[in-house]
Image: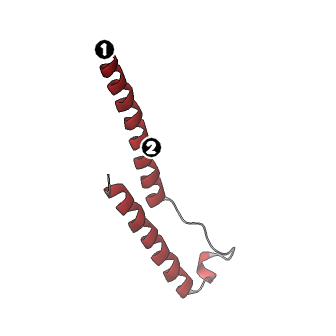
């Protein structure tokens, strides 16, 4: 086994790990639950706040999906 093969093997191993972690991070970002902005129970919150939270979450999910699709 020559040096070129060893270098290629190591680089492939590292890239596989880096890309795997990036994909895992993107999936986690897209699927994680957003924290509540207030301590009030869900039923007491205004509907506008819920709509805004859902819009923000959808926007963040779209951004993460675009980042993942670049690869």
Disc 2: which residue: 21
Depth check, front residue: 20 or 34: 20
Give the secondary structure at mark 2. Answer: helix
User: How many labels were placed on the picture?
Assistant: 2
The residue drawn where x is 64% and y is 75% is 41
Residue 1 image offset from top left, x and y in percent: 30, 12
Say which quarter of the image contains residue 63.
bottom left
The span from disc 1 to disc 2 (Cα, nearest Å) is 29 Å
- Residue placed most toward the observer, 54 or 41: 54
Q: Is residue 44 above or below residue 21?
A: below
Q: Is residue 67 above or below residue 51?
A: above
Whole-percent x, y for residue 56 in the image: 49, 74
- Residue wearing tag 1: 2
Residue 71 in picture, x, y percent from top left: 32, 51
- Rendered residue at 67%/75% (across/down): 38
| Mark closest to the chain's N terminus, 1 or 2 | 1
* Residue found at x 40% / y 48%: 23
Tell me which corner region of the image, top left, top right, bottom left or bottom right, holds residue 31: bottom left
Looking at the image, is 68 positioned above or below residue 56?
Answer: above
Q: Position of residue 47 (x, y in %)?
A: 53, 86
């Amino acid at each position: 086994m020559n040096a070129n093969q060893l270098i290629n093997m190591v680089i492939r191993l590292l890239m596989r790990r880096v890309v795997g972690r990036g994909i895992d991070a993107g999936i986690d970002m897209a699927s994680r639950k957003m924290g509540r902005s207030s301590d009030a129970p869900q039923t007491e919150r205004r509907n506008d706040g819920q709509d805004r939270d859902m819009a923000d979450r959808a926007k963040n999910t779209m951004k993460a999906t675009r980042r993942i699709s670049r690869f």
